[in-house]
Image (tube, grey):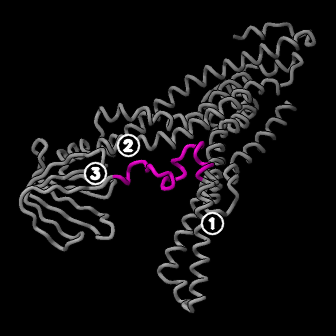
């Protein structure tokens, strides 16, 4: 691996056509080796943390955990790529500088900037892959996690009720039982916290059973001798067997693209949806203008701020907010993916200047300032762009600052 150092240094003109290409391959292979090993280790760590959190928080079974792994993988890679890219270049360039390899290359008549080219090539190729993984994580990974959890809700509920006699779901309902006998709930009490226009509803029964209906996306509760309070009626006693339906569709990925959050849409669909959302916004503006004009013509100006006017105004405000988010989302994903490049752009020259062969010292020296600087700027730019206070490309604020710092460090390396 270090055979290039054995070349004579007294004839740089003869070496210059051969040595750079050999040097580029050497540095690139060193970066790739460390990157692959550290990526596997960090991804496995994030996978265990992510799956373990879902296991503890939602009580998933073994089958559900296995089904969850493919969806958690792109989410894990989304966060692992920038850190492992920075770690690999810090290790390689910190060691090379500490071992005197940088000085040897410079003495051979080759600029130290030539050493940075493999890192930049590596980061430039990695960044589009990181954009794709980020897109896959938000448009396929997260909805897939929600789908697995939803399809396992029956088993989760029984497992938690058997252990704790109480289960509270993220879908807006809770169940309390005296005990669980097989698949039978003894003295269940079900509270639906969000009953829509009818308000909360509380149901108690002598016994009952839960069953998931995946087609209707409903949790079916078959009860015996039940009593209902709230909802559409104040109180009702229902003898015999009765089946109640608890809707779970809010947790599923909405099939109507206009109802889905921009953060859940793949990049290939965002452009078309952005055009359609802009059309909806213009239509709502026209509806508001027509409503206002009609109120003035009929001398009923008080209706402008009435219930119908407020409804149109709320719809217009939501439509504009969604349109802004649709414009911002592609910039966000590309900025996040290309953070790999800018992390390397700063980390490689900084590690070369630091001259330490201790991997963790070099990584800490590079990653801690990057972490404290980049992520707050990224989050700040993202929030401001979502609120419409800055243009969508404001999410690149953190990348821009890193580019400026990296340029200054590279100029310092050039004078090295």
**Vertical position of residue 301 compared to residue 76: above or below:** below
Tell me the distance, in whole angstroms, between the alpha carbons under discs 1 and 2: 34 Å
Q: Which mark is residue 147?
A: 2
Q: Name the image quarter holding the N terminus.
A: top right
Provide the residue span drawn in magenta.
249-273
| Mark 2 nearby-residue class (10 Å; few <14, some 14–19, many ≥20) | some
Residue at 65% from the left image edge and 62% from the top image edge: 388
Where is mark 3, residue-wise?
218
Labels 3, 1: front one: 1
Which mark is drawn over residue 282? 1
Residue at the limit of the structure toward the bottom, as seen here: 299
Q: Is residue 135 left or right of residue 186?
A: right
Asked if marks 3 and 1 touch (Cβ < 8 Å), the reply is no
Q: Is residue 245 left or right of residue 393?
A: left
Q: Nearer the viewer, mark 2 or mark 3?
A: 3
* Residue 4, above or below 53: above
Q: Residue at x 66, y 51 (%)?
A: 395
Q: Quadrant of residue 371?
A: top right
- Circle nearer the N terminus (2, 3): 2
Q: Is residue 357 magenta?
A: no
Disc 3 is placed on an element classified as strand
- Spatial CA span between label 3 and label 1: 36 Å
What residue is at 77 percent from the left and 13 percent from the top?
A: 22
Residue 187 in percent (x, y) is at 10, 56
Q: Secondary structure at mark 2?
A: helix
Q: Where is 342 relative to 310, above or below?
A: above
Q: Which mark is residue 129?
A: none
The location of residue 185, given as percent across then percent down, is 13, 50
Residue 361 in sight: no
């Amino acid at each position: 691996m270090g055979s290039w150092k054995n070349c004579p240094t007294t004839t740089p003109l003869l070496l210059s056509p051969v040595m750079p290409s050999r040097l580029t391959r050497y540095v690139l292979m060193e970066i790739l080796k460390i990157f692959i090993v550290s990526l596997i280790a960090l991804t496995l760590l994030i996978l265990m943390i992510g799956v373990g959190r879902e296991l503890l928080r939602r009580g998933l079974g073994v089958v559900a955990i296995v089904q969850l792994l493919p969806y958690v993988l792109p989410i894990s890679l989304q966060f692992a790529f920038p850190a492992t890219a920075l770690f690999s270049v810090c290790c390689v360039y910190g060691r090379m500088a500490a071992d005197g390899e940088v000085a040897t290359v410079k003495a051979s008549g080759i600029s130290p900037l030539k050493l940075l080219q493999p890192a930049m090539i590596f980061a430039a190729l990695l960044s589009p892959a990181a954009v794709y993984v980020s897109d896959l994580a938000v448009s396929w990974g997260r909805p897939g996690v929600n789908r697995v959890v939803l399809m396992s809700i029956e088993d989760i509920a029984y497992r938690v009720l058997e252990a704790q006699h109480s289960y509270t779901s993220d879908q807006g309902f809770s169940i309390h039982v005296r005990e669980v006998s097989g698949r039978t709930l003894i003295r269940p009490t079900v509270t639906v916290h969000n009953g829509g226009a009818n308000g909360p509803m509380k149901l108690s029964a002598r016994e009952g059973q839960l069953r998931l209906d995946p087609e209707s996306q409903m949790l079916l509760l078959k009860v015996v001798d039940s009593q209902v309070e709230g909802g559409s009626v104040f109180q009702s006693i229902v003898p015999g067997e009765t089946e109640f339906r608890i809707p779970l569709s809010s947790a599923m990925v909405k099939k109507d693209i206009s109802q889905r959050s921009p953060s859940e849409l793949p990049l290939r669909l965002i452009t078309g949806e952005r055009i359609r959302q802009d059309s909806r916004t213009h239509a709502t503006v026209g509806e508001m203008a027509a409503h206002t004009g009609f109120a003035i013509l009929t001398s009923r100006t008080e209706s402008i701020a009435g219930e119908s006017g407020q409804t149109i105004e709320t719809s217009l405000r939501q439509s504009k907010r969604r349109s802004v988010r649709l414009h911002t989302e592609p910039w966000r994903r590309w900025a996040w993916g290309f953070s790999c490049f800018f992390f390397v752009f700063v980390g490689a020259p900084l590690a070369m200047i630091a001259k330490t062969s201790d991997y963790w010292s070099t990584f800490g020296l590079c990653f801690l300032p990057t972490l404290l600087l980049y992520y707050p700027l990224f989050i700040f730019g993202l929030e401001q762009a979502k609120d419409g206070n800055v243009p969508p490309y404001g999410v690149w604020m953190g990348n821009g600052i890193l580019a400026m710092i990296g340029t200054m460090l590279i100029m310092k390396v050039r004078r090295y």
